[in-house]
């Protein structure tokens, strides 16, 4: 075929038709994908939704942190924490089916604020290393309506620390490849999309990883864990947010860490009610202070 002096073959025609079809399909998926996500949102209220890591997210059977929290506080909690994830992005941030990155705080904040969990769903469908509870938790988070949520807890830091992620970038406050930049990026997203949502930061818990020095001495490349806790408190001050300071105030230290954890990090049955009680008491204190 020749038109306007340009010779086109049947192969070219098929190529152009394929491109057109791809754009049409993308438009259909874009339109109906958003409609489907919106349709899945539940008409219910949550007192607290928590995004975090395995400190809160790992245990999903009997005696979980969110069960204890609801008992102690009288508040409902959606536990949307995923084990293994960071606040910040890493070198695999755009690698398909690498769930640790699509479940980072940055990517989850985007999914919640844009109401589009397609990347997370695709990653989990392809992942061979996901935990059993991940898909159920993702579905619960996708169904939650931030407009019907009172408090959003952001509990991150331990995995950023062990991954050696940089604390901050003085030249770019929103560098999502740093812990501080990732927190700021997520806070900005949530504040713009849901201005009535109360955001409370939760510092990481003291830990001692087997085979290494304790977290006040071991530096995996970004600093010691207390520096991550301090950075989080600084960012809370930047934005005028409340912070629940687990690292310095809950009472975990080198003398008792194995009493509360089974491996120096993940809470055993003796540690989970202590952690949940601490969260419940602090949230009650914050509520009382604001009502005065």
Image (tube, rainbow, N blue to C red):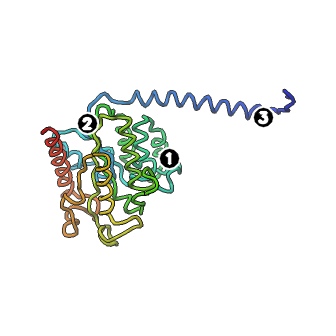
- Report the disc number at residue 150: 2
In which quadrant of the rendered image does the N terminus lie? top right
Residue 189: % across, % down: 40, 40
- Pointer 3 or 1: first along the chain: 3
Question: What residue is at 26 percent from the left and 59 percent from the top?
Answer: 205
Identified at 51% across, 27% down, the residue is: 31
Q: Quadrant of residue 163?
A: bottom left
**First of labels 2, 3 by sequence position:** 3
Instruction: Examine the rendering and report whether any part of residue 190 can be seen.
Output: yes
**Residue 85 visible to an observer of this rendering:** no
Question: Which callout, 2 or 3, points to the residue nearer the camera?
Answer: 2
Considering the image in quadrants, where does the C terminus appear?
A: top left
Q: Residue at x 67, y 30 (%)?
A: 20
| Circle 3 SS class | helix
Residue underneath mark 1: 126
Is 218 or 228 nearer to us in this picture?
Answer: 228
First along the sequence among labels 2 and 1: 1
Marks 3 and 1, how far apart in space? 33 Å
Question: Looking at the rendered structure, which numbered label has been put on residue 12?
Answer: 3
Label 2 and label 3: CA atoms lie apart by 56 Å
In this rendering, the answer to whether 244 lies above or below 161 is above
SS label for mark 2: strand
Looking at the rendered image, the disc whose residue lies closer to the viewer, 2 or 1, is 2
């Amino acid at each position: 075929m020749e038109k306007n002096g340009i010779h086109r073959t049947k192969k070219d025609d098929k190529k152009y038709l394929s491109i057109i079809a791809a754009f049409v399909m993308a438009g259909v998926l874009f339109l109906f994908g958003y409609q489907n996500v919106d349709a899945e949102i539940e008409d219910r209220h949550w007192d607290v939704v928590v995004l975090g890591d395995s400190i809160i997210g790992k245990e999903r059977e009997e005696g979980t942190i969110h069960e204890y929290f609801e008992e102690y506080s009288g508040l409902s909690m959606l536990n949307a924490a995923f084990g293994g994830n960071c606040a910040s992005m890493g070198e695999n941030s755009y690698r398909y089916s690498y769930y640790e990155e699509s479940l980072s705080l940055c990517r989850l904040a985007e999914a919640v604020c844009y109401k589009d969990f397609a990347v997370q769903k695709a990653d989990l469908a392809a992942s061979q290393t996901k935990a059993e509870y991940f898909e159920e938790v993702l579905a619960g988070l996708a169904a939650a309506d931030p407009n019907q949520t009172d408090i959003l807890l952001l509990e991150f830091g331990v995995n950023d620390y062990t991954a050696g992620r940089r604390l901050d970038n003085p030249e770019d406050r929103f560098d999502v490849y740093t812990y501080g930049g990732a927190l700021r990026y997520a806070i900005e997203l949530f504040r713009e999309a849901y201005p009535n949502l109360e955001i409370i930061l939760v510092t990481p818990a003291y830990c001692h990883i087997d085979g290494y020095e304790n977290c006040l001495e071991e530096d995996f490349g970004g600093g010691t864990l207390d520096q991550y806790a301090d950075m989080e408190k600084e960012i809370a001050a930047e934005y005028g947010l409340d912070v629940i300071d687990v690292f310095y105030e809950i009472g975990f230290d080198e003398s008792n860490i194995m009493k509360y954890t089974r491996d120096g990090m993940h809470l055993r049955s003796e540690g989970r009610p202590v952690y949940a009680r601490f969260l419940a008491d602090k949230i009650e204190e914050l509520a009382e202070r604001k009502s005065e």
